C-alpha cells in the first residue's frame, strides 16, 4: 500500500513494438525486478528459441505467451515513482487480442503508446489510439522504441513523430510528448542516453512521474466491472476488478448486475492484504456473503443494492465510425465492448447529429443511434458515470466504431 495517489497506466501499441519489454525494463530500472530474474528469463527465452524476450517475460507469464513471444491477455504490475503509485497494465498488440486490450484501456487513466521506429504506424497503432481516445484515456505519452535498430537517428525519430502526430490529431489528442528510446538496451528509460544527444526532453520515468493525478471519481455511486472470478481457499469466491467509481466497505449491501446476485460485502483485498475500504481507481479482489463462483461472471458490474447498476433494454448513443468495409444500416448486429463486458447489439435507428434519419453510415461518419442488446448488459449514461458510459464496436476482428451513451431504456 502507498500514500501516493494511484493510477492505472496502460501500455498500448502494435504487436512486437516492445510494450512488454518496456514494462519489464521499467520494473528492472526501478528495482522492482532483480538482475537474477532477468538472467533466468534470458536463459528460458533462449531455450524456447525466443532470445531477446527476457524483459517481456516479466509481464508475459502464460506458457503460451512465452512460447509464442506474444502477449495474449492484459497483465497488471505495481510500481512507484516519486509522485505516483502506478499499476501498469501491459496490453496485447496482436489483432486477435484487441478485446483484451479494450478491457485494459477501459481500466486505464493514462497510457504509453509504443511505436517501433523501424515499423512506424501499423494497424493496431491506429486502432489502439482510436480506442484509447474513445474509451476515455486522458493522457498519452508516445515512446518511439527500438531506436538502437536505426542507429539512434534523429531524422528517423522525427519522421515517425510526424506520422504519429497526424494520427493523434485526427482523434483529438494534442500536445503529446514523444520520447526516443530503446526498451531493450535501456536508453532514455531512467537516465538520458548518450546515444541520443539531440534529445533534451524527459526520460520515460520522468515523464510518467510528471503525469497529472487523475480526477477523483469517488463521489459517484459504486461501480465495479468484474474482470475475473477466482476461488481462493480460506476465503471462497473472489471476483476481481477495478473500482471505477465510488467506494466500497465491508458490511455494504451490494448487487451484481445483470446476473442479479446480491449479498453483504464481507471482505476486500488489495495486493493480497485485507483493507477496510477501497475507492475509485483501486484494483481489488473481494468476497460477498452467499455469492458463489457460478453466480457472477466477467462483465457483471457490482454496485450498491439501493443504487444498482443500470441494465439496459435499449440505449441511445453517439458514435464515430472508424472503419467498415461497406456501410452500417439498421439491423446490423456487431459486438459492443463496454467496460469488461461484450454483447451483440442490433442497430434499430440511425440518425445524424441533428436528429434526421439516415439510411446508412460509413467510415468517418458521426451518428446518433438506438441499439438493442441481445442479452442484458450494464451500461450507464456517459454524462452521469463516464467510466461506464463508453464502448467500442467490433466485427470480424476489427474495431468498427466507438461511442458514448446518451440515454437508457432500462430493462
Ligand atoms: P505484444 O505484446 O505481443 O503485442 O508485443 P510487445 O509489444 O509486448 O513486444 P515485446 O516486448 O514482446 O517485444 C517484441 C520483440 O521486440 C522482442 O524480440 C524484443 O526483444 C524486441 N524489442 C523490444 N524492444 C526493443 C528495442 O528497444 N530494441 C530492439 N532491438 N528490440 C526490441
Ligand atoms: Mg507484450
Image (cartoon, helix red, strand yellow):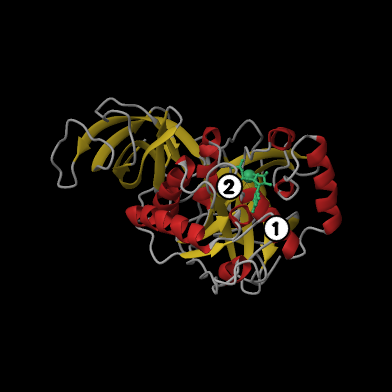
SS for callout 2: loop
Q: Is residue 136 above or below residue 365?
A: below
Callout 2 crowding tier (Cα within 10 Å): few <14, some 14–19, many ≥20: many
Distance CA(mark 2)–CA(mark 1) = 14 Å
Give residue 408's position: percent from left, percent from top.
Answer: 32, 43
**Can the viewer see residue 251 in this picture?**
no
Give residue 162's position: percent from left, percent from top.
Answer: 41, 58
Q: Residue at x 24, y 28 (%)?
A: 329
Q: Is residue 180 above or below residue 263?
A: below
The one of 409 and 328 positioned closer to us in this rendering = 328
Q: Is mark 2 within 8 Å of ligand 1?
A: yes
Q: Is residue 396 left or right of residue 43?
A: left
Q: Which residue is mark 1?
A: 185
Q: Which residue is mark 2?
A: 17
Residue 195: quadrant of the picture: bottom right
Q: Residue at x 16, y 35 (%)?
A: 358
Q: Is residue 106 above or below residue 344?
A: below
**Can the viewer see residue 131 in this picture?**
yes
Which residue is outermost to the left?
356
Q: Is residue 296 left or right of residue 330?
A: right
Residue 84: quadrant of the picture: bottom right
Q: Is mark 1 within 8 Å of ligand 1?
A: yes
Q: Residue at x 64, y 58 (%)?
A: 182
Q: Residue at x 72, y 56 (%)?
A: 271
SS for callout 1: loop
The one of 297 and 308 positioned closer to us in this rendering = 297
Comparing labels 2 and 1, the label whose residue is closer to the camera: 1
State the mark number for residue 385. Answer: none
Amino acid at each position: 500500500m502507498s500514500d501516493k495517489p494511484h493510477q492505472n497506466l496502460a501500455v498500448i501499441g502494435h504487436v512486437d513494438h516492445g510494450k512488454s519489454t518496456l514494462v519489464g525494463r521499467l520494473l528492472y530500472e526501478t528495482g522492482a525486478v532483480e538482475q537474477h530474474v532477468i538472467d533466468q528469463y534470458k536463459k528460458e527465452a533462449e531455450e524456447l528459441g525466443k532470445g531477446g524476450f527476457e524483459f517481456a517475460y516479466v509481464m508475459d507469464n502464460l506458457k503460451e505467451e512465452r512460447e509464442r513471444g506474444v502477449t495474449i491477455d492484459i497483465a497488471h504490475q505495481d510500481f512507484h515513482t516519486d509522485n505516483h503509485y502506478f499499476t501498469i497494465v501491459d496490453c496485447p498488440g496482436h489483432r486477435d487480442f484487441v478485446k483484451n486490450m479494450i478491457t485494459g484501456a477501459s481500466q486505464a487513466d493514462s497510457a504509453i503508446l509504443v511505436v517501433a521506429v523501424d515499423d512506424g504506424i501499423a494497424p493496431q497503432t491506429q486502432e489502439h489510439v482510436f480506442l484509447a481516445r474513445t474509451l476515455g484515456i486522458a493522457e498519452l505519452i508516445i515512446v518511439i522504441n527500438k531506436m538502437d535498430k536505426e542507429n539512434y537517428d534523429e531524422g528517423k525519430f522525427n519522421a515517425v513523430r510526424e506520422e504519429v502526430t497526424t494520427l493523434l490529431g485526427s482523434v483529438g489528442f494534442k500536445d503529446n510528448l514523444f520520447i526516443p528510446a530503446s526498451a531493450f538496451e535501456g536508453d532514455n528509460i531512467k537516465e538520458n542516453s548518450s546515444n541520443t544527444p539531440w534529445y533534451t526532453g524527459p526520460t520515460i520515468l520522468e515523464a510518467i512521474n510528471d503525469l497529472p493525478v487523475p480526477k477523483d471519481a469517488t463521489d459517484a455511486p459504486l461501480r465495479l466491472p468484474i474482470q475475473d472470478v477466482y476461488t481462493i481457499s480460506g476465503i471462497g469466491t473472489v471476483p476481481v476488478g477495478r473500482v471505477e467509481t465510488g467506494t466500497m466497505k465491508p458490511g455494504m449491501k451490494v448487487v451484481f448486475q445483470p446476473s442479479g446476485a446480491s449479498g453483504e460485502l464481507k471482505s476486500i483485498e488489495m495486493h493480497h492484504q485485507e483493507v477496510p475500504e477501497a475507492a475509485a481507481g483501486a484494483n481489488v479482489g473481494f468476497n460477498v456473503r452467499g455469492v458463489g463462483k457460478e453466480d457472477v461472471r466477467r462483465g457483471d458490474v457490482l454496485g450498491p443494492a439501493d443504487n444498482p447498476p443500470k441494465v439496459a433494454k435499449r440505449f441511445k448513443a453517439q458514435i464515430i465510425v472508424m472503419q467498415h468495409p461497406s456501410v452500417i444500416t439498421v439491423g446490423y448486429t456487431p459486438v459492443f465492448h463496454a467496460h469488461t463486458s461484450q454483447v451483440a447489439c442490433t442497430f434499430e435507428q440511425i440518425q445524424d447529429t441533428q436528429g434526421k434519419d439516415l439510411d446508412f453510415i460509413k467510415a468517418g461518419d458521426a451518428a446518433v443511434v438506438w441499439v438493442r442488446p441481445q442479452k442484458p448488459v450494464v451500461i450507464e449514461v456517459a454524462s452521469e458515470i463516464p467510466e461506464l458510459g463508453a464502448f467500442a464496436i467490433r466485427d470480424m476482428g476489427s474495431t468498427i466504431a466507438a461511442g458514448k451513451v446518451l440515454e437508457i431504456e432500462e430493462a
